Amino acid sequence: MSEARPLGLFQGFGIELEYMIVQRQTLAVLPVSDQVLKAVAGDYVSETAQGALAWSNELVLHVIELKSNGPAASLDGLAEAFQADLRRIDGLLEPLRGRLMPTAMHPWMDPHRETRLWPHDYNPIYESYDRIFGCQGHGWSNLQSMHINLPFADDAEFARLHAAIRLLLPVMPALAASSPIAEGRATGFLDTRLESYRGNAARIPSITGAVVPETVSSQAEYQARILKPMYRDIAPHDPQGILQEEWLNSRGAIARFDRSAIEIRVLDIQECPQADLAVAAAIVAVLRALAEERWSALPTQQALPTQALAEIFLQAARYGGDALIGDRAYLAALGASPAERLSAADLWRHLLECVPLGGGPQAGACSQALGVILDDGCLARRILAATGPEPSHSRLRAVYGELCDCLLEGRQFRDLP
């Protein structure tokens, strides 16, 4: 999100959506993202601009990413742009006997057997990750997410935005969890992606930290507290310095000073772009209120202990909207009554009653999509209701086939028709 003059708070939005490519009939992973990109770019490229969006590769060949082509001035219209490009990609995949599957994890992929890393440009980076951490695991090769990039213009705006994201991040999985199934079974987590993700760099703990980032107030402090220790710790494993860049940071929100933005990374991908953009709209609206200190002052937000926030985050990853929050300081900082425990879903209801989702034409569609999430449960909860607690392979194929149809048709998942 770099420009000659950095954008200020909430003056631009970068959205990234990742999808897995699967075989059209069996739904097994299909490693052909390079062929899709070559079909539109004429060569094996890592990224190609396609109008309002860009398409790009990821670590593995069965995942493709769509993202806003530079910062968008508004979230309005992005759902339609993503939906149109998803239909284009479906057409490109048809002769390859493939299709796109939503949700944050493939429900029965064996990453140790089926992982194929991107073999073209940027391969030295991916090979370094694989050599140090081993990328044949769910936390590396079986995870699809939405990233939200939000800009800041200077240290003062960075401090306000970082504090707001840090405060709201623990309950983001309550809206976005979509990964209850792995290796053909229910895992006990509604957000298995995050449970896998938080351990994928365990060999070097400073890279991920507690997922919830530490409090920092400036670029210099961020460099000293987060980036330099991480670079120091990986240096013995990375003597050529290939990975010693800002993107090595695997916290749930990372500062990208190279483009004056913070990237939020804890959001599971949903069943259609409209649902993703509704989640993004909700998060942006609440972050704006927090940055304006609507419910709590900046020092109060920054003072909340990282470990306390991490405990709420882990509960939301396991239980989604049913996670119970009893931390009085946390609830008070979000303007909720600290007198009793609230479910994460009820906390989101409180927050969304207090903030507008924007006055654009998409506000109604976002409200409707969020109503499904809050009333019927996050996508992971709805998937489990359809699969049952001990699903057969045929049942999983039926449910995830319906999810593929939801993605292509741009509608939310309720149950099998």
Image: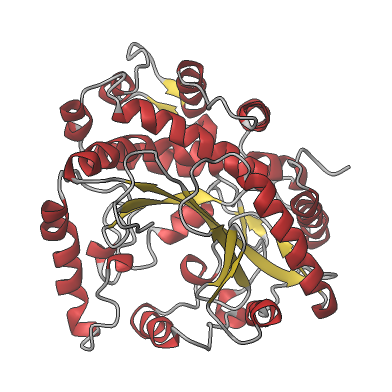
Give me the residue at 55% from left, 76% from top: 60
Give me the residue at 55% from left, 48% from top: 188
Q: Quadrant of residue 169?
A: top left
In the rendered view, tell whether residue 366 sits above or below residue 45: above
Q: Quadrant of residue 241?
A: bottom left
Q: Position of residue 361 (x, y in %)?
A: 65, 30
Along the line of sight, the residue nearer the viewer: 103 or 41: 41
Viewer can see residue 272: no
Give me the residue at 55% from left, 42% from top: 176
Give me the residue at 49% from left, 26% from top: 348
Q: Position of residue 343 (x, y in %)?
A: 48, 24
In the rendered view, tell whether residue 7 sits above or below residue 182: above
Quadrant holding the C terminus: top right
Q: Position of residue 21 (x, y in %)?
A: 69, 69
Along the line of sight, the residue nearer the viewer: 348 or 205: 348
Q: Position of residue 274 (x, y in %)?
A: 66, 42
Viewer can see residue 188: yes
Quadrant holding the N terminus: bottom left
Along the line of sight, the residue nearer the viewer: 183 or 72: 72
Horizontal side, residue 110 vs residue 162: left or right: right
Horizontal side, residue 314 vs residue 143: left or right: left
